[in-house]
Image: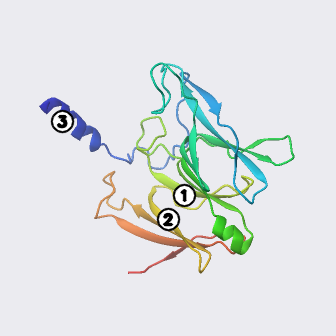
Amino acid sequence: MVLFFLSCKKEAEKPKVIYENPSKVVETTKGDTTKVAIVDLPIHMDGTNYLLFPVGELNRTEKNYDSSSRGNQISYKVSNYSEYQITGFIRNVKFQQLGKDSIKSLTSKNILIQSITYLKTIADKTKQQILVYVAEDLDTNKDSKLDDSDIKALYLSDISGDRFTKISLDYQELIDWDILEATSRLYYRTIEDTDKNGAFDKNDKLHYYFIDLSNKEWKAIEYNPI
């Protein structure tokens, strides 16, 4: 039990950022031949003109794909959908306009998306239909894979998947984000590993940003509320 505890503690203390070759930003990870791409059935957000198909991975070496599996039954579920939000371990998203046959991908980038949120109240107010993504896009801990041990980033796109844009800075960990409907602004906080110890703690610097979503140009503005 003592050895197990020490092993768990060592794993928990694994740095989230490793600064080997700091001039080189790693954007891709090694391919995994044990996994095969699968796609969920389409999701439609009320009031929009597009279908979204979340893309994930099925592990060839495991009978059970996720916690919803029972016994030897394989679950092919990639994501979960609640009102205006998709969550899961999503590797890409396909978009199809209603009434059209063509389907296009969100990105060709290696990325792991954990949540996609449709800003319905902003769409009602500004007529701009915007999606917010929380994702990992850089192998910051240099373990040759993207997962929730890497730094979280914030992205935006149109409901069509166009203008897929990273709005947080590389190597700044996303803490949280929120919408202020009164001003049509998206506010978010990040943390920077200023002491370069590979972890995010109280000694590091917090950054505060907002984007005015009523403007067609998504420009992040840093502000200092302290």
Residues at circles 3 and 1 in contact by the CB criterion of under 8 Å: no
**Residue 169 has which mark?**
none
In the image as oriented, which residue stretches furthest toward the front?
70
Image vertical order of residue 12 relative to residue 77, above or below = below
Q: Is residue 14 above or below residue 58?
A: below
Residue at mark 2: 177
Is the residue under label 1 in contact with that under label 2 (CB below 8 Å)? Answer: yes
Q: Nearer the viewer, residue 172 or 128?
A: 128
Q: Which of 178 and 206 is in front in this view?
A: 178
Q: How crowded is mark 2: few (under 14 residues within 10 Å), some or many (20 or more)?
A: some
Local secondary structure at mark 1: strand
Q: Earlier in the sequence, mark 2 or mark 1?
A: 1
Residue where numbered disc 1 is placed: 154
Sequence-earlier tag: 3 or 1: 3
Residue found 55% across the figure and 39% down from its top:
28
Question: Mark 3 Cα within 10 Å, few/some/many (few <14, many 20+)?
Answer: few
Q: Is residue 200 left or right of residue 109?
A: left
Mark 3, secondary structure of its residue:
helix
Name the amino acid type tagged 3: Phe
Inter-mark Cα distance, 2 to 1 = 9 Å
Percent position (x, y) of residue 123? 70, 68
Is residue 51 found left or right of 116 in the rendered image? right
Q: Mark 3 points at which residue?
A: 5
Residue 172, horizontal then vertical, whole percent: 45, 59
Please, what secondary structure does the residue beneath circle 2 have? Answer: strand
